[in-house]
Amino acid sequence: NRTKYMNVFDRIREVYKSMIRFSEENPKEANILDHMYRIDDGDFRDELLSSSKSENSGIFEEIISSAKEDGEIRSNLDMDVLIDLLYNLDIFIKDSLDNKSRLFDYEAKVDRLVDILEFGLKSSTKNNRDSKDIFF
């Protein structure tokens, strides 16, 4: 309920932070999931993780659909690609942190990654803007 008043990027941040809170509160289950992500057999790994991916992708799909309807993000974004990216960012974050990293390290990394999503890669200086930028 508290996320309904957040913008799309804060909602995305909250999803990631909820995932890590779950991991800290349920270390055995989190450890099992972490091991499943690292299985070399891609088909077997995908089969094991399909329910988890479906549930988390559904959360991201809801957030992105709502943001598109509200005009918070571009309407022409490829929904499937964006949802896959958001789902896989969690795996990237966990892989980039060492085993001794704490919640703070994870949340800081989430904030930096979502900032890239929110503000993009392109510089907003006048020298890098073209005519399309003036209208968006």
Image (tube, helix red, strand yellow):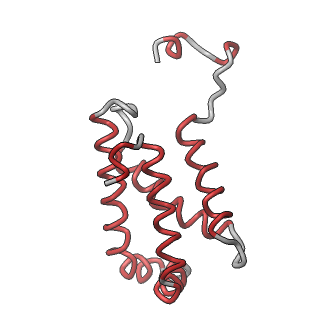
Residue at image position (46%, 12%) is 135
Task: Name which quarter of the figure residue 124 lies in.
Answer: top right
In the displayed structure, 115 sits above or below 85; it is above
Task: Name which quarter of the figure residue 116 lies in.
Answer: top right
Residue farthest toward the front in the current orientation of the protein: 2
Task: Name which quarter of the figure residue 87 lies in.
Answer: bottom left
Horizontal side of residue 98 vs 45, given as left or right: right
Horizontal side of residue 67 vs 89, given as left or right: left
Residue at image position (40%, 34%) is 73
Residue 55 on image: x %, y %:
32, 67
Horizontal side of residue 12 vs 105, given as left or right: left
Residue 112 on image: x %, y %:
64, 49
Residue at image position (46%, 55%) is 86
Residue 38 on image: x %, y %:
56, 80
Quarter of the image for the N terminus: give it: bottom left
In the displayed structure, 90 sits above or below 2; it is below
**Which of the pair 105/51 is nearer the observer?**
105
